[in-house]
Amino acid sequence: MPTPQERLDAAQACWNAGDLDGYLELYDDAIKLYGYSPEPLGKDGVRAFYEQIFEAFESPPLTFHEVLWAGDTCTIRFTMGGRHVAEFMGVPATGVQIQLHGITTLRFAGDRVIERHSVADMLGLLVQLGAVPAPA
């Protein structure tokens, strides 16, 4: 069985290779992902959310800046890039190259994530896409 760090490294490599199925191996079937919808997402919801990302942003690279571990939990500051090539959150494709910054905390059971809490700069993303004006 891989260690949590090895599973995380493999997931990032799969994401950056465009392998969503490989990326989703990170998550346990009982995953609860908080922060992207009013209610936590289960595994099917996680897949549907990331399918939207892969459709809307061309080859979205995922960069980890810091990964901090405390027991079975890690917190990651990340950036996702990509060119906006299809509708996302009601915004038609713009062709704009984006940078989405965020922080996420993953709790592992064995080598799979069972709980995830994420915060991403969605306002900054919408500003980059021209959907809302930049704050004054």
Image (tube, rainbow, N blue to C red):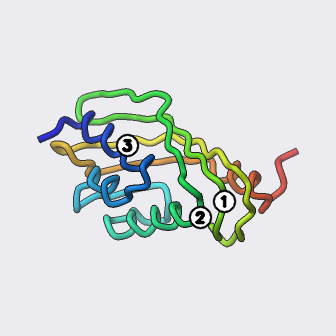
The residue singled out by tag 3 in the image is 13
Q: CA distance from mark 2 to mark 1?
A: 6 Å
Q: Residue at x 65, y 64 (%)?
A: 85
**Frontmost residue, 74 versus 54:** 54
Name the element at disc 3. helix
Q: Residue at x 33, y 37 (%)?
A: 9
Image spot of residue 121 (x, y percent):
62, 47
Name the element at disc 1. strand
Q: Residues within 10 Å of mark 2 (few under 14, many from 20)?
A: many
Image spot of residue 72 (x, y percent):
24, 35
Q: Which mark is residue 84?
A: 1
Left or right: 36 as drawn, with respect to 101: left
Q: Amino acid at mark 1?
A: His
Image spot of residue 120 (x, y percent):
56, 48
Q: Residue at x 50, y 29 (%)?
A: 65
Q: Amino acid at mark 2?
A: Ala
Using the image, determine if residue 33 lies above or below residue 73. Answer: below
Q: Which mark is residue 56?
A: 2
Name the element at disc 2. helix
